[in-house]
Image (spheres, helix red, strand yellow):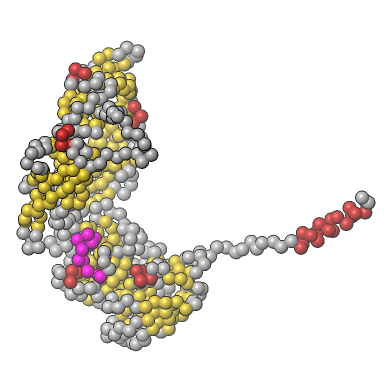
Amino acid sequence: MSVKYFWYLPLILFCWSCAQQGSPSGGPLDEDPPVALESDPPNYSTRFKAKKIEVTFDEYIVLENVNQQLIVSPPMEEQPEVKLKKKTLIIEFEEELKTNTTYTFNFGDAIKDLHEGNKLQNFEYVFSTGDILDSMSVRGTLKYAENLEAPDDPISIMLYTDLVDSVPLIDIPLYVGRSNDSGVFSVNNLRPDVYKIFALKDGNNNFLFDLPTEEIAFLDTSLVINADLARQLLGDSMVSLATPDTIYDDSTGFVSDSIVDSGPDLNAIYIDLMLFTEASDIQYLTNNTREDRRKIQLVFALPLSDTFAFRTLQSPDESEPRFLDHYGTNRDSLTLWIMDSAHYKMDTLKIVVDYTVKDTLEQFVVRRDTLLFNYREKTSSGRREQATEKEEEKLEIHTMRNNGNQDMNRELSMLLDFPVESLNDTLFSLYHIPDSIEIPLPFVVKADTMNPYRATLSATWESASKYRFLALPGAITSIYPISHDTIDVSFRTRDLEFYGQILLSLTNVNNQVLVQLYSGETMVEERIVKADGQYVFPFLSPKEYKFKFIHDLNENGKWDTGDYLKKLQPEPVELLPVTVEVRSNWDHDVSVSLEK
């Protein structure tokens, strides 16, 4: 090759690179929601008479679940028809509008842009059929009464000027709003008046509190809504006059064309609502199973009364089965263990249960159900030959947890799959191993009177020490003649310095309080407290904990929900606003002054 070709090579490469087609780098990702440019009739119109509304946006939009998201306040009998034409949102309705009334169309998060899916939160279109636009608002937060968490789903906020107690059961509201995913709500464009206020998780979307499972919140008293009251509550120095504008309010998360401001609103009343589900008084059998041929389980909606009874149905030549019955902690479930093999080997059993319910006249009557329990042995479909003799069944006993670490303040647990019948002390052994020598230790072994599937061994534990636990076959007997293998477990106790403790100083205790200590979602301990003082929570593993305080006003040892028609709010709950990070060998002082 001639040398002169090397002189042309750079030029050729330059031209080739210039001819290549590069892919565009693209601009920044669009993260802005659509913006309403104009409306016909204009937003915030008065003397409104149109049957169609058109709102044009700055980009193409799509609608998502608009029939569920759109809230019209006051509600219309027929939901308006909503459709799209290019960048324009069209709302059509034929319903006769009320005179001198301000209407608000709130679209929730139904509106989003076509390409990136950016949602326009709580866009509102507002008009008045009269000469003025009503400008009052009710704003606030909604939480579940039992745990003070915000509801994930939107909850309807309903306002009535009819002040009778039965109004949410028989009539639709005059004004409707919706909470967001933080529990914040704002019902805008209200006329000054006196209102009853409710929040409702409307199970059948009819704006009526008519299902026993619907969640409700209510204000104890009627609420006067007017600017003078708002000024009195907030103080003139704290508020600024509201003006129509379009802004994003960081405190509520709402984007709208409604009346907004840069601080507390002179035209708004602020309230908090606590959401709850009323305790049902409808008793019924929710489930009945026989997953093991020896075991029948019944589950009821409510605790069983003392009149509950059961019996079996069998032919005249059959003996009556014997059962060991075990009621659940709340007496809303029953486990029946069939004692005789002749009966539990039967594929079909009939049981009659009698339990108390309320009839349509609210009178207590006895209901009788006849239940059929079938059981068939489960076999593998790929198995061609059945063994002539079954493998011997063993009684499974579970002992150590925590990777072989025994807590200093706890008994050693033994958990069975079947109820415990008896314990033979002579077949248990416990040894302390300070070095290589096993030293027998005194202990007490007993069946748990509250849990028929549990036995415990208690001893005086030494810190950070080795132990060996031995249970020979026959040490534990269940109600069935099933033997267990030898249990031989080595374990260590925790070092006392592993634990931390919380010293809780409580003040302003004006009623019985249930103090609950949680690790994550697990309740570690519960105390009943009736007076100010310091309460010690020892032997805590190093991790984060939180406190919950239930004001047990009726002193029945549990949290009670509310009842609207009885005008009962749920029992108040308070949470320690921060978690307590417990460290090993530390005392953690926590001071709480209760507010309720």
Is residue 212 part of the magenta span, yes or no?
yes
Residue 152 visible in the picture: yes
On screen, 388 above or below 359?
above
Chain part drawn in magenta? 206-216
Q: Position of residue 494 (x, y in %)?
A: 32, 26
Is residue 10 part of the magenta span, yes or no?
no
At a point 28% along the width and 32% down the height, the residue shown is 539
Q: Position of residue 24 (x, y in %)?
A: 65, 63
At a point 35% along the width and 13% down the height, the residue shown is 436
| Quadrant of res 151 | bottom left
The answer to whether 362 appears left or right of 183 in the picture is: left
As rendered, which of 284 and 376 lies closer to the eye? 376
On screen, 302 above or below 18?
above
Residue 556 visible in the picture: no
- Overall secondary structure of the magenta stretch? loop
Q: Position of residue 186 (x, y in %)?
A: 32, 68
As rendered, which of 549 and 415 lies closer to the eye? 415
The answer to whether 119 appears left or right of 300 in the picture is: right
